[in-house]
Amino acid sequence: QEEMSEPMPWFGMDIGGTLCKLVYFEPKDLSGCESLASEVETLRNIRRYLTKNSAYGKTGHRDIHLQMDNVKIKGISGTLHFIRFPTSEMKNFLALAKYKGMAKLVTTVCATGGGAYKFEEDFGKEVNMKLAKFDEFDSLLKGLQYIDKNNPSECYYWANPTEPSKCFKVNHDFSHPYPFLIVNIGSGVSVLAVYSATNYRRVSGTSIGGGTFLGLCCLLTGCNTFEEAIELAAEGDNTHVDKLVKDIYGGDYQRFGLPGDLVASSFSAFASFGQMNSREKRSKVSRQDLARATLVTITNNIGSIARMCATQEKIDRVVFIGNFLRVNPIAMKLLAYAMDYWSKGTMKALFLEHEGYFGAVGCLLQFHE
Ligand code: ADP
């Protein structure tokens, strides 16, 4: 494998606190990229390996619905594949890569996220792979711009978020995006103000994010996965858990514009979990209610921070991303409603289909700059 000292740039990895996101670019026409015959053979092997689901073990998933065909990286046409697995499985992932012979085929992987540092030694020792490391926010923005440009239905918003029967996704043209706020909801939350393709600032963040939701939900309900937590929440009612405005005022608190049934429309409590000091109320509450209350509490807190940042930066478009929003329409609709309601219609919540994968794509792209 000596002739392949040239690093092979087809993998981008974003190794986060909870999930590892892996993006693989599969070139379509191998004759166009001036590769050595041995590299073409290598590519065929990688393709064969990665399009079989056994490649990912029990805990890995390829998000086939997100796959992007006919995209170009550095003039080469190909397909982008999107794969994720729990970061806690990293050691097993490396063992599997070694066992399947991947380690001999790939010499360099582009990487970002904290795990690019944490696991760098393991990549070298276990599978003799080098990591080309890139900054996670640079990567995030590069990936976001690239994917939005290549997917006309990438960006959307939720119409009528207050009326479940009339609430639906609407495509949004994000071709002139600046300035905008990014709220990245991963294990924790980062807020970036983006003024141009290269000019951005991390303006805020909170440690109360997707990791908090999942951790608290597991503690309170005994559930074990994110999917289970979301399913429970979908069937629960947070008004059995939260203290509402009307519980305290007996009606609206008009002076501050707080409607009494604030939580009946389920987007903000006067005091989240405020009823749970009562033994009687606790005895009546269900796992579903607790999951819903946890989801609503975390989401509203993030929405509130997002709104304050947007006001401070005088920005009216707020893009919510990160895997907390995966299979999570409740949180998205809540954010959409809260942004609209509390800003009196001046701010807009936007969402992106490839919500958790921008960092992984972006670090791959940066390799080619
Ligand atoms: P990070 O880079 O910190 O790992 P992500 O953007 O990948 O952040 O989001 C992680 C969060 O996404 C978790 O805290 C959890 O709330 C949510 N999530 C969505 N799907 C899963 C999953 N399959 N396993 C674990 N967490 C998930």
Image (spheres, rainbow, N blue to C red):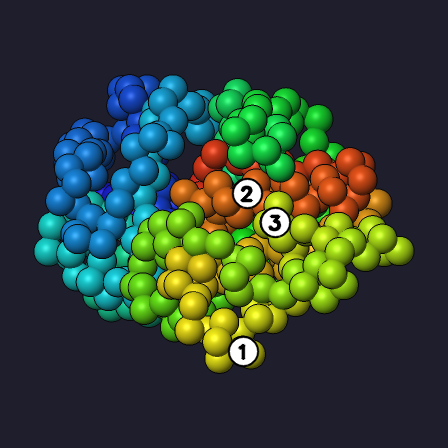
Task: Tell me the SS state at disc 2.
Answer: helix
Q: Nearer the viewer, residue 186 or 98?
A: 186
Circles 1 and 3: CB atoms closer than 8 Å: no
Which label was assigned to residue 264? 3
Residue drawn where x is 79% and y is 43% of the image = 343
> For the residues carrying marks 3 and 2, which lies nearer the camera in this image?
3
The answer to whether residue 56 shows anywhere in this view is: yes
Task: Tell me the SS state at disc 3.
Answer: loop
Residue position for label 2: 332
Amino acid tagged 2: Met
Task: Tell me the SS state at disc 1.
Answer: loop
Residue 10, image x, y percentages: 34, 39
Amino acid tagged 1: Ser
Residue position for label 1: 278
What residue occupies the far right of the structure in this picture?
255
Dot 3 or dot 2: first in sequence order is 3
**As drawn, 230 above or below 40:** below
Query: Neighbour class for label 1 at 10 Å: few (<14), some, many (≥20)?
Result: few
Residue drawn where x is 29% and y is 22% of the image = 28
